[in-house]
Amino acid sequence: MKKIITFLMSAIMVLSLVACGSAKEQTDMEAVKEKGVLVVGITDFAPMDYEDDNGEWIGFDADMAKAFAKSLGVKVEFVEIDWDNKVMELDGKTIDCVWNGMTLTDEVKSAMDCSNAYCNNAQVVVVNKDVADKYKDVDSLSGLKFAVEAGSAGEKEVNALELECTPVKAQSDALLEVKSGTSDAAVIDLLMAGAMIGEGTGYADLTYTVSLNSEEYGVGFRKGSDLVDALNKFFADSYKDGSMMKCAKQYGVQESIIEQ
């Protein structure tokens, strides 16, 4: 009798472990479809993600994320995150992906599973137009006080050059630092510089000079996520049918799009 009871208890424990294991094996795709929402982590970063006059998130990345979510049969929700905490937000499952002109650095690729690269970019130095002629190469940057987005590729480049810098929440804040005179210069993404500074913008007195690197953008997911393959297929299909390029032209980033 004792053997039978012991056997039954063992069987129950095994079944319980199997049940628990099954619950943990839900894929990201299944989780997203179950809740009906793809939660996308972003920052305010024109022309990739920014709010229109009605408070709706638009931009090349935002519009592509909406289209990807639609292809999965779910809605999209944008969550503005602290860029320096993007991996923590992802691993904590408060977001499903990081889709915000994210540079595919070695650090990013070691912390996330990333999509294929979809856009070329660079980190550029932004200064006031009236002093731009003084800063045409890396050597000329010594002594400047920079503003950079915390955790960004721009911060990495400035630190590598051992230049003085102040981390701020977003690239848009870095531009404000230069405009207000709090910082001498900022390092931001080339695509953002092209969209937000110069004639006809709110930063008409600013310009960009030195390019510090060349890089590529990708979308980040949790390690082992099956959403990566789904997005890569979506990118390939969107490139092939022309919808990706149509969206890129709407936001002026068509020259940076990488063939899928």
Image (tube, rainbow, N blue to C red):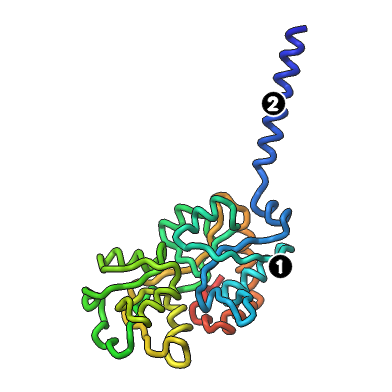
Q: Which residue is mark 1?
A: 70
What's the distance in space between the residues labelled 1 and 2, CA to CA?
Answer: 40 Å
Q: Quadrant of residue 164?
A: bottom left
The secondary structure type at the circle numbered 2 is: helix
Residue pictured at 31% horizontal, 68% vertical: 165
The secondary structure type at the circle numbered 1 is: helix
Residue pictured at 64% horizontal, 77% vertical: 243
Q: Position of residue 168 (x, y in %)?
A: 40, 68
Residue pictured at 51% horizontal, 77% vertical: 46
Q: Which residue is mark 2?
A: 14
Q: Is residue 53 above or below residue 78?
A: below
| For residue 112, side relative to residue 180 (left or right) | right
Q: Is residue 31 above or below residue 118?
A: above
Residue 246 showing in the rendered view: no
Q: Quadrant of residue 36?
A: bottom right
Residue in the foreground of this view, choosing between 144 and 124: 144
Q: Position of residue 65 (x, y in %)?
A: 62, 69
Q: How many marks?
A: 2
Amino acid at pointer 2: Val
Residue 82 showing in the rendered view: yes
Amino acid at pointer 1: Lys
Q: Are marks 1 and 2 in contact (CB under 8 Å)?
A: no
Q: Position of residue 105 (x, y in %)?
A: 42, 61
Looking at the rendered image, the quarter that the N terminus falls into is: top right
Classify mark 2: residues with Cα within 10 Å, few (<14), some (14-19) or many (20+).
few
